[in-house]
Image (cartoon, rainbow, N blue to C red):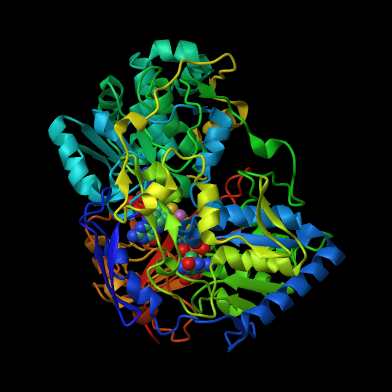
């Protein structure tokens, strides 16, 4: 999202910095942006496609040959076993190029397969589920800069640059929080750790990991009990309020204080401050969506916005802009619950489609379970599932059973190492693009077009072009609606594709092409919200399945209660992001990470209690596996929890965690699924045993 100025010498990028003339990010860029040139010139980058021996050995191969061979093998598999025996896994780097996802979807349609998996379903798919069960406000969110309260639950936007509303200016997160407080905003952060964001808050609720359902339920209880909710909004737009009140009747702050670790007074204060403010929302991140009861957690946190009516109304400006995306109809009404997973296709493992995709936690079993539509070929686009998925050993075993694994990937990652073919893509500075993917995420109506600033290795093409070529080799044309991306004659250009994909936007791409620093469009472009139409729905506050989950959570099922006071060798492992790295991308570039490993953050008193000091190796163990990580003393982490970033370690053989870090995924299992709809495993609040690692 950040505007960058890249210094190029002799055709190679030698430096990168924030662009002061960039209208949206005003010269800001984080360490990822300042190091982006190093990713392009990293010595281990594949400069051409590779044939892999599935054990980490690679030999260069001409792209045309690779495409022919892949096309032939996919066609064979499709003919013999049907289209659903071909799968595709979409990772986070696929979101960095506008054409990739539309072309991925066209590719899946052309093949005729429904075996589509995304990182989203091991991330915050609770948001997909919550929207599906609760409904959504068609006119979007309230704006951060117009609000007087905000509650951040389990998100640390100062570091992650996510987790606020679209209107939260992530490139100046800390400053934006301070300015908001100066204006009178009351900021609440519910996070087990005293995060960078929590430090800026008026009220930090350091809840016990995995207890969001209890905390949110008690806050809701106070609001309803004290009649602080928006009665008129509820009369017009919700059903199930009386049921919700009954279900929460006994969930007093005192009843959850001990288990959440939050004093009853603070729960009451949070509830009153949130509900008596005039505007402002609760937004969540990975914390609640990765711990136990994730779908319920997300639902309950969203209920705060719903019962307090914290949505923009008819006659107001819409909070999010659509510069390059279509301007949808914005009505002040509820888009009713949809539950897409309950109708249509159901996988043989029993899962419905979430947002057109199947739960990623079911991917390994889709490969291993015998049956007619067992996945035999998998294409990975911009992801590193071997690093990202819980239980890497079982994922590896599954991937080894594939007849064909193709990775669109610039580096020899642990996933690439298992591949038959690695197709080396042009990287971000080597392709033209527009800001469409982030259209809704700028706090201003901003748009930008950038040309490719580097040529890119001659033997490489863009991700979407590889997919079009594979389809071509299979004799399948790719179309987006009636727009032909590719056919037997070849494919359109990226520029043509960008024009097509941006055609419904308010901005003229030709005009953007003449403005190298991007452009902020007139505020008038913010659409005004129309009154509710005839087909308006209602928020379903407490459907039966949510009610069942709530009852179980209130019985403390699955919730790990604290042992911090008596067991220094026990802790709950929690998720976190690390500043300079994007999941596994950049973990081996020292100017990005500062340390070549991901430290395990432990409270100093707990560290002392297990007779360890900072820099020591720690052994973390669960019934699923063990991990050795480097200790860091960190008093922002409460005793009884540890905080460790994911996607570290990599395929390197050296076993020293000081050189390559630790993969917390090894402590988790994909089969310990906690959520029925999306098969979401527990990635945060995982009970671990903790000890100083002694080499014997
Ligand atoms: N620098 C950097 N930025 C990134 C990424 C990266 O790898 N590096 N990854 C990107 C991706 S893929 C994503 S999905 C986003 C995620 O964006 P965020 O969700 O904002 O990610 P985190 O910073 O990990 O914040 C999660 C917070 O949840 C807290 N937490 C843990 N367990 C619980 C719990 O049970 N309840 C509550 N309430 N809180 C809990 C953690 O302490 C942590 O502070 O970040 C994106 N941004
Ligand atoms: N234990 C634990 N596990 C987690 C999480 C956690 O908090 N804890 N977080 C989860 C979350 S939120 C996510 S999103 C996932 C991340 O899961 P993934 O998205 O699968 O992981 P990444 O490492 O981001 O994979 C991106 C890959 O794209 C490659 N790449 C870079 N540029 C390009 C390009 O231009 N084109 C292509 N084709 N590839 C490119 C990178 O080298 C990298 O290998 O991890 C999840 N796993
Ligand atoms: Mo993510």
Q: Is residue 481 visible?
A: yes
Tell me: 371 left or right of 291.
right
Instruction: Tell me where residue 233 appears, x and y as whole percent.
Output: 42, 14
Instruction: Tell me where residue 520 appears, x and y as whole percent.
Output: 30, 42
- Closer to the camera in the image, 680 or 82: 82
Instruction: Tell me where residue 131 appears, x and y as whole percent.
Output: 53, 34
Instruction: Tell me where residue 222 appears, x and y as whole percent.
Output: 35, 22
* Name of the residue lying farthest toward the right: 80
Count of picture labels: 0
- Closer to the camera in the image, 508 or 75: 508
- Closer to the camera in the image, 225 or 135: 135
Residue drawn at x 44%, y 32% as measured from the top left? 302
Tell me: 548 left or right of 46.
right
Tell me: 176 left or right of 435.
left
Please tell me whether residue 566 is drawn above or below residue 416 in the rendered image.
above
What is the quadrant of the C terminus in the image?
Answer: bottom left
* Name of the residue lying farthest toward the left: 182
What is the quadrant of the N terminus in the image?
Answer: bottom left
Residue drawn at x 61%, y 49% as measured from the top left? 679
Q: Quadrant of residue 403?
A: bottom right
Tell me: 182 left or right of 38.
left
Q: Quadrant of residue 470?
A: bottom right
Q: Is residue 609 visible?
A: no
Please tell me whether residue 467 is drawn above or below residue 217 in the rendered image.
below
Please tell me whether residue 148 is drawn above or below residue 485 in the rendered image.
above
């Amino acid at each position: 999202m950040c505007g960058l100025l890249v210094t190029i010498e002799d055709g190679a990028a030698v430096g990168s910095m924030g662009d002061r003339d960039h209208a949206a990010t005003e010269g800001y860029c984080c360490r990822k942006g300042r190091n982006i040139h190093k990713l392009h010139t990293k010595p281990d980058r594949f400069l051409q496609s590779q044939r892999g021996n599935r054990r980490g050995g690679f030999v260069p191969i001409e792209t045309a040959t690779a495409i022919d061979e892949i096309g032939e093998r996919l066609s064979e598999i499709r003919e013999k076993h049907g289209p659903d025996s071909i799968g595709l896994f979409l990772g986070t780097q696929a979101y960095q190029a506008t054409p990739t996802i539309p072309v991925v979807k066209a590719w899946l349609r052309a093949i005729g397969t429904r075996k589509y998996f995304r990182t989203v379903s091991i991330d915050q798919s609770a948001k997909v589920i919550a929207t599906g069960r609760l409904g959504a406000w068609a006119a979007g969110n309230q704006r951060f800069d117009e609000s007087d309260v905000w509650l951040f639950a389990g998100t640390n936007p100062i570091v992650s640059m996510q987790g606020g509303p679209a209107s939260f200016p992530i490139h100046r997160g800390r400053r934006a929080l301070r300015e908001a407080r100066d204006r009178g905003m009351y900021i609440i952060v519910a996070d087990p750790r005293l995060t960078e964001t929590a430090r800026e808050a008026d009220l930090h609720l350091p809840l016990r990991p995995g207890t969001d359902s209890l905390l949110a339920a008690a806050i809701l209880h106070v609001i309803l009990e004290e009649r602080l909710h928006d009665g008129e909004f509820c009369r017009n737009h919700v059903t199930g309020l009386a049921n919700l009140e009954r279900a929460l009747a006994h969930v007093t702050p005192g009843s959850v204080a001990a288990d959440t670790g939050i004093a009853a007074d603070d729960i009451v204060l949070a509830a009153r401050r949130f509900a008596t403010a005039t505007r402002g929302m609760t937004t969540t991140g990975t914390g609640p969506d990765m711990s136990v009861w994730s779908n319920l957690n997300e639902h309950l946190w969203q209920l705060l916005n719903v019962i307090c009516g914290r949505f923009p109304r008819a006659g107001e400006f819409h909070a999010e802009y659509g510069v390059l995306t279509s301007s949808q109809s914005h009505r002040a009404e509820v888009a009713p619950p949809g539950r897409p997973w309950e109708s249509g296709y159901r996988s043989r493992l029993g899962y419905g489609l979430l947002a057109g995709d199947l739960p990623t936690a079911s991917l390994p079993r889709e490969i291993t379970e015998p049956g007619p539509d067992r996945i035999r070929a998998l294409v990975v686009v911009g992801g590193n599932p071997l690093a990202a998925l819980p239980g890497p050993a079982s994922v590896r075993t599954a991937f080894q059973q594939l007849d064909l694994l193709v990775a669109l990937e610039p580096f020899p990652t642990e996933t690439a190492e298992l591949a038959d073919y690695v197709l080396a893509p042009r990287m971000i500075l080597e392709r033209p693009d527009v800001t469409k993917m982030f259209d809704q995420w700028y706090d201003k109506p901003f748009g930008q077009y950038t040309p490719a600033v580097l040529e890119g290795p001659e033997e490489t093409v863009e991700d979407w072009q590889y997919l079009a070529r594979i389809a071509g080799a299979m004799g399948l044309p790719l179309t987006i609606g009636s727009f032909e991306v590719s056919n037997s004659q070849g494919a359109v250009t990226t520029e043509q594709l960008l024009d097509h994909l941006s055609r419904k936007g308010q901005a003229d791409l030709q005009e953007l092409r003449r403005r190298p620093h991007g452009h902020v469009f007139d505020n008038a472009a913010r659409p005004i919200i129309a009154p509710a139409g005839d087909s308006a729905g209602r928020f379903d506050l407490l459907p039966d399945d949510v009610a069942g989950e709530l009852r179980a959570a209130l019985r403390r099922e699955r919730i790990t209660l604290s042992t911090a006071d008596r067991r220094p060798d026990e802790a709950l492992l929690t998720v976190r992001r690390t500043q300079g790295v994007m999941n596994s991308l950049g973990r081996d570039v020292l100017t990005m990470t500062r340390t070549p490993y991901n430290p395990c953050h432990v409270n100093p008193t707990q560290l002392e209690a297990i007779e360890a000091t900072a820099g020591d190796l720690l052994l973390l163990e669960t019934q699923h596996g063990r991990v050795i990580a480097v200790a860091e003393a960190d008093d922002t982490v409460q005793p009884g929890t540890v905080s460790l970033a994911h996607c570290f370690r990599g395929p390197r053989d050296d076993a020293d965690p000081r050189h390559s870090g630790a993969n917390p995924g090894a402590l988790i299992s994909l089969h310990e699924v906690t959520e029925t709809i999306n098969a979401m495993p527990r990635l945060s609040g995982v009970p671990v045993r903790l000890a100083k690692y002694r080499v014997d």
